[in-house]
Structure formats: structure tokens, C-alpha cells
Image: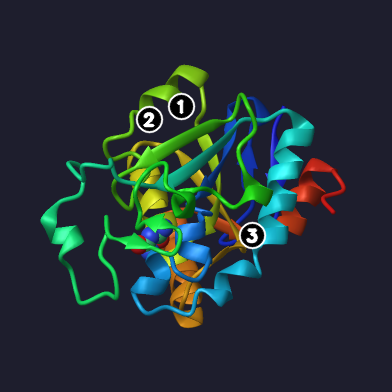
């Protein structure tokens, strides 16, 4: 069985038996005041608006019994997987590993590093900690997806031009077809979000495809709200 979704730059066709949803970094550290995104000087309030759409997208995959991968950008407590080039970059209010209002910034297991409770992974769903921007670096995720027979990925999460786009590019290079759900991703910078989407779909879909959630739900003939 194949499903065809109206998308840019042209219809995205996938086999539900070979598709997984990837939700990138919907963590308190990026979305709530006092986390990593905030310490970098961003207006984190922009990111909250997509939470209901991401929840609906997750609900759609759960209803259909399709696999879901959740990622967290997270470092080990001893920071052995956080290169100085990342930790010492710029002049943030707090650095990775420093203690903030939600525990240690971007450290695995800290309250601020958790995925938002309303989007939390359920037992049986894949949840990975990734030390980099991309979801394949030092995670073993490619081997896991290969073992499941996954060849196509639907993407959501934050931020569009950083961890989402990096993960899509990494996935593209590993042979996955990638569809970004436009209203289930956000950036601290509106122009970066739109530019990233244009870069992804340009040149005949050089990185992948993009479409709103409603188009995916319509193709799957499932009510998504
Ligand atoms: C960033 C991310 N922006 N999840 N991480 O550093 O996009």
C-alpha cells in the first residue's frame, strides 16, 4: 500500500509499513524560560505555539500504530560528549552544564532536559539522547531504523534550521525520504524557519518535502484534531 501526500515540491509517496515519525527536541530546555534556548538570548515563547500541532501529529501516528522517534539534545553529566567548541561558544547567560532554573543546562536527566509533558514518549516509542544537532551522530539511530525496515521519515520539532534541518540532511544522506510538517516545526527566527523550508524543497526537493499536517491527515484519511 502507498499513500500520496500533497506536498512541496511535489507529492510525497510513502509506504506506511516503512515510515516513522521523528519529533526533534521538543524539550523544556528549548521551549521554556530558563533553559538552553533562553540562555542563548532567544525569545522562547515563539516555540510554544506548535505544541498542539505536534501533539496532533503524534496522536495521528499513535492512532495508526506507526513508529515514533523522540529526540533530546542532551549531554552526559560529566560533559564528556560535549566538545569545548560547543560549550565555550559565545557568551551565553549560562553554559551547558551550568545550573539554571530547571537544573543543569542541556544535561541528560535534568528537569529542563525533559520533553514537554504533553508530548512525552509513551512506552514502546523510541527516545534518544543526541549530543549533536543531528540525530544520527553518536546515537545508533540509523541501525535501529534499518532494523525496523524504515526508509521514510516524517519530521517535526525544533528548531527548524538547526536540529531539524541537520537531522533531515543527515537522513537524506543515509537514503531516507524526508517529509517536514511545516506547522509542526518552529524557529526562534521566523525568517530562518521559512528560509530553511525553502532550502529543503528547492532544486526538486534536494533535502526533502514539506507540507502542513492537514495534508498528511487527509492523505491518511484520519481526523487529526
Ligand atoms: C539548537 C536545536 N538550536 N534543537 N538545538 O541548538 O535546534
Instruction: Please state the horizontal and vertical placement of residue 163, each as a whole percent of the image.
Output: 39, 56
Dots 3, 1 in contact, CB < 8 A: no
Q: Quadrant of the N terminus?
A: top right
Q: Which badge, 2 or 3, comes first in the chain's sequence?
A: 2
Q: Nearer the viewer, mark 2 or mark 3?
A: 2
Instruction: Please state the horizontal and vertical placement of residue 65, each as a whole percent of the image.
Output: 73, 28
Instruction: Please state the horizontal and vertical placement of residue 182, each as a whole percent of the image.
Output: 60, 63
Q: Which badge, 3 or 1, comes first in the chain's sequence?
A: 1
Residues 17 and 116: in front is: 116
Q: CA distance from mark 2 to mark 3?
A: 24 Å
Residues 8 and 180: in front is: 180
Q: Is residue 202 visible?
A: no
Identify which residue is drawn at 27% across, 42% down. Answer: 77
Circle 2: is it few (<14), some (14-19), or many (20+) Cα within 10 Å? some
SS at badge 2:
helix
Dots 2, 1 in contact, CB < 8 A: yes
Q: Which mark is residue 211?
A: 3
Direction from residue 139 to residue 12 in the image, left or right? right
Q: Which mark is residue 142?
A: 2
Identify which residue is drawn at 43% across, 36% down. Answer: 128
Instruction: Please state the horizontal and vertical placement of residue 90, each as a whole percent of the image.
Output: 19, 74
Which residue is identified by label 1?
145
- Label count reads 3
Amino acid at each position: 500500500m502507498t499513500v500520496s501526500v500533497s506536498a512541496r515540491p511535489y507529492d510525497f509517496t510513502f509506504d506506511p509499513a516503512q515510515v516513522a515519525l521523528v519529533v526533534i527536541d521538543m524539550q523544556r530546555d528549548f521551549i521554556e524560560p530558563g533553559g538552553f534556548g533562553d540562555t542563548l538570548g532567544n525569545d522562547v515563547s515563539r516555540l510554544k505555539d506548535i505544541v498542539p500541532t505536534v501533539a496532533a501529529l503524534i496522536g495521528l501516528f499513535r492512532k495508526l500504530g506507526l513508529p515514533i522517534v523522540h529526540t533530546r539534545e542532551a549531554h552526559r553529566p560529566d560533559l564528556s560528549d560535549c566538545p569545548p567548541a560547543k560549550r565555550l561558544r559565545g557568551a551565553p547567560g549560562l553554559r551547558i552544564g551550568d545550573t539554571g532554573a530547571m537544573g543543569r543546562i542541556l544535561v541528560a536527566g535534568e528537569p529542563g532536559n525533559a520533553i514537554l509533558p504533553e508530548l512525552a514518549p509513551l512506552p514502546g516509542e523510541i527516545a534518544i539522547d543526541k549530543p549533536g544537532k543531528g540525530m544520527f551522530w553518536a546515537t545508533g539511530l540509523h541501525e535501529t531504523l534499518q532494523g525496523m525496515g524504515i526508509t521514510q521519515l516524517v519530521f517535526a520539532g525544533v528548531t527548524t534550521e538547526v536540529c531539524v534541518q541537520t537531522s533531515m540532511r543527515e537522513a537524506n544522506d543515509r537514503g531516507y525520504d524526508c517529509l517536514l510538517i511545516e506547522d509542526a516545526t518552529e524557529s526562534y527566527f521566523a525568517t530562518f524557519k521559512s528560509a530553511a523550508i525553502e532550502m529543503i524543497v528547492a532544486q526538486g526537493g534536494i533535502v526533502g518535502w514539506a507540507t502542513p499536517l492537514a495534508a498528511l491527515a487527509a492523505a491518511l484519511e484520519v481526523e487529526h484534531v
